[in-house]
Image (cartoon, rainbow, N blue to C red):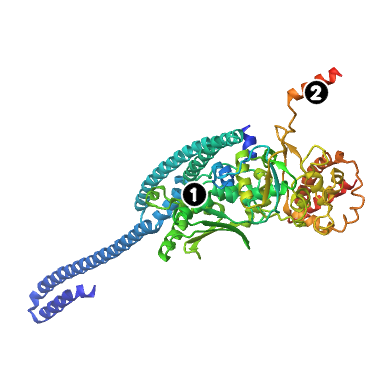
Amino acid sequence: MLVGLLPAVVIGAAVGLAAAGGPGTATSGIIWCGLVGAAAVAAAGFEAVRRGRALEWTREEAARQDAEHRHRLARQQAGMLELARNDLPQAVARMQGGEFITDVLRSYERQHVNNAGDEFHDFRHAVLRAVLDAVDNEEAMRESAQRAFVNIARRVQAIVHRQAIDLRKMEDRHGDDPAVFDDLLVIDHGNALIGRLADSIAVLGGARPGRQWNNPVPLYSVLRGGMSRILDFRRVELHPVSEVAVVGPAVEPLIHALAELLDNATRYSPPQTSVHLTAVEVQTGIAIEIEDGGLSLGEEGRARAERMLAEAESGIDLNGLGETPRLGLAVVGRLARAYGFQVSLRPSAYGGVRAVLIVPDVYITTAPAPSRAHGIGRIATTTPLAFPSHPGQPDSEAYPSGAGGFADTPPRPHPATATHTPAGGFAAASAFPRAVPNHAPAPVGPGLAAVPYEDEPPVVLERTANGLPQRRRHAAPSRFGAAAPRTPQPAPEPAPAPVAQAAPVPQTPAPEPVQPGLWLAAFTNGVNGTAPSAGQGGPGHASDEAAGKGDK
Amino acid sequence: MSNQDWANANPERLYVISGGRDRKSATAGFDLVTLVVARARPEPTMQPEHAAILRICGSPLSVAEISAYLRLPNSLVTVLLADLLAERRIEVRAPVPPAALPDLSLLEAVIHGLQRL
């Protein structure tokens, strides 16, 4: 401001001097002119200063706006970057994870980018929506394609199962005609292969592999079930396995996963080599090992295979399957993810691959598996404990106490002919389970049958529709658990035993009422938690009760 | 009906039990009434069906009976028996032939002779 006044002051001073030095008459004129001039200059100075300030202010304003725009641009850029790098992939992933598009959009609606402006937000949202819409459509298409796959697979499975049941009936019907029977087996095998393919498609479509099993199935049967679904099952060497059963829901996936692993093993090993199939108990469950003598999987190949398993476990893209050479591993990976199996592939000592599938504890039960396994199931490891070998004796007496093993199979309801005495003999021997093998009387007749079933109440007589007797096994633990402590008790009994108690009467009827109680006892024990390990405490307890009944 | 079937069905198929061998490999002439007796005791490493046969054949059983008890078709049981026979774990014998009756004409001759007395 003062700068603006300076010229006016100078003029004022000049006018003052002029007025002082000039003639008296001119003084007033000079002063007036000077004042007017000074005033004009002052005004001009003011104006110049004012304009200068305005200009400065405008410039500052412009610079500030510029900076603000830059900031905003940067924020928008960051917003876009965020959208591209994080939000969009996340949103797509969430969509693929099965969330609804509206939910995903709503959660992003609240995320405002600070000071980026509403318009920008709207645009951003529009982009997100457009992309998610596209993804949604894609997902829907994929889903319907998968559903179609699964649908078709289900129909094939239904036909295959129908066929399998029919074939089994035909096999029974034509069992006497070897030529027809053998041909039926061939068809049956082919049918099982088709079934496995349909199961694979269903699994890759994200569905369950196939049929449901209601009851536990013995592990041995499960392993053989897996064998029955591959082409080259003859080469599979099944080793004895422990007597456990697989709970119903896990049976089918396990069979299928095993079938795929066995198929890989037989397919990628020389045709003359055999594939070893074993199962051992481990800390976390049951480890099923499949070992082949084929080409060793190099470190690279192994890594690739394991990666394929891992990829399958994290969800598989149907589009990518076309190039996958070993389709089976994808299926195995899927099943492993769904059911918590652990699968690993390692080089084998035989030079090939050793696949280990660990079935978690939760799927393993030691409870009796009611599935009948052709009436024999768990015999794989039943050793007759009291088996006196009398090589010199005639046949019928040579193996009287095969009952150690036989005890779990019910005495067959033979017509009470004394000579034809498997029932009598075996039942008798079961009274002396292991302590007194040598005294075990050689089959002396049907009378003995009356004594012994208190120890072993396994006698389950069922008749099939056509009147044939049906044997059924029961829990392994009950046999060993109950038999061991009882050995002293029956010892005094052999004396009265031979006294023929004329008791073909209780022989058959008595065991039958025992069975329901036995099951119920095991059940209540399990429910009350009195016997936490139902497999061991339950049946043992139950057989005590049963024995009590038998005594009465 | 199918529910029942599904509940009782078994994952194993018969061809696995027979190990893929067919009847042609079974050379011994088994028929339904051939009697089978175990000569050895079942071992834990055996196939369950083999062990079961050895166990129930403590006293002689016919092939038909074995087949009924195991609920397996005859042809399959025959294959299994052939395995056991090859390992000499069982003994097989033909059923006792029905007593040979004397010739009908001889009987008539005897009757006539008696009537003439």
| Chain letter for mark 1 | A
Q: Amino acid at mark 1?
A: Asp
Left or right of residue B108: residue A60: left
Percent coordinates x, y for residue A172 in the rendering? 61, 35
- Is A15 located above or below residue B6 in the figure? below
Seen from the viewer's position, the closer of residues A85 and A548 is A548
Query: Could you tell me which residue is drawn at 41 percent across and 47 percent down?
Result: A318
Q: How many marks?
A: 2
Q: Say few, some or many: other residues with alpha carbon within 10 Å of mark 1 (under 14 / 14 to 19 / 20 or more).
A: some
Q: Amino acid at mark 2?
A: Val
Q: Of the numbered discs in the image, which one, if any, rests on residue B110?
A: 2
As measured in the structure, the alpha-carbon distance from the residue carrying label 2 to the one carrying label 1 is 68 Å
Q: Is residue B10 visible?
A: no
Q: Looking at the image, is A73 positioned above or below residue A101?
A: below
> In the rendering, which numbered label is found on residue A232?
1
Figure check: B26 above or below A62: above
For the C terminus of chain A, the quadrant is top right
In the drawing, does residue A381 fall left or right of residue A386?
Answer: left
Residue A15, x across and y down, in percent: 12, 77
Where does residue A431 sit, x and y in percent of width and height? 83, 52
Q: Position of residue A293 (x, y in %)?
A: 48, 60
Q: Secondary structure at mark 1?
A: loop
